[in-house]
Image (cartoon, helix red, strand yellow):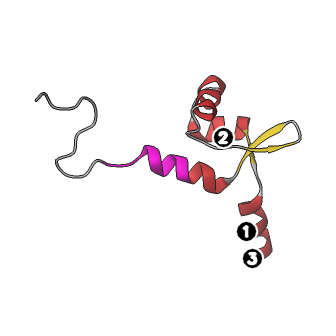
Amino acid sequence: MLVSAMEDELRLLTIDEVVKLLRISKATIHKLIAKKAIIPVKIGGRTLFSRQEVRRFIEQQTHTPLQGEKRGRKPKA
């Protein structure tokens, strides 16, 4: 059972799998790759993603601002 879990963790995800997992379009995933917001693994002509990279991307996107910190525009001086 441990080997199976380890193999599953090492299995790379395809673009289609990441698109379904994140519920975004292929165009969006390509934009994220271009902005280096999510880093793929290139093997031959294939573009794949490690599960760790997908987790890192999700955690980065779900960052909750610290108390007093606001998203968006900077306050006027």
Crowding at dot 3, Cα within 10 Å, few <14 / some 14-19 / many 20+, comes out as few
**Secondary structure state at the residue bearing disc 1:** helix
Q: Is residue 49 visible?
A: yes
Q: Quadrant of residue 8?
A: bottom right
Residue under label 1, please give it: 5
Which residue is situated farthest in the bottom direction here?
A: 2
Range covered by the magenta-colored residues: 56-64
Using the image, tell me which numbered label, if any, was put on residue 77: none
Residue 49 image offset from top left, x and y in percent: 70, 46
Q: Quadrant of residue 45?
A: top right
Residue 37 image offset from top left, x and y in percent: 55, 39
Using the image, tell me which numbered label, if any, was put on residue 18: 2
**For the residues bearing labels 1 and 3, Cβ distance under 8 angstroms:** yes
Q: Nearer the viewer, residue 14 or 31?
A: 31
Using the image, tell me which numbered label, if any, was put on residue 2: 3
- Identify the residue shown where x is 64% and y is 44%: 39
Residue 19 image offset from top left, x and y in percent: 64, 35
Residue 37 vs residue 60: left or right?
right
Nearer the observer, disc 1 or disc 2? 2
**Secondary structure state at the residue bearing disc 2:** helix
Q: Amino acid at mark 3?
A: Leu
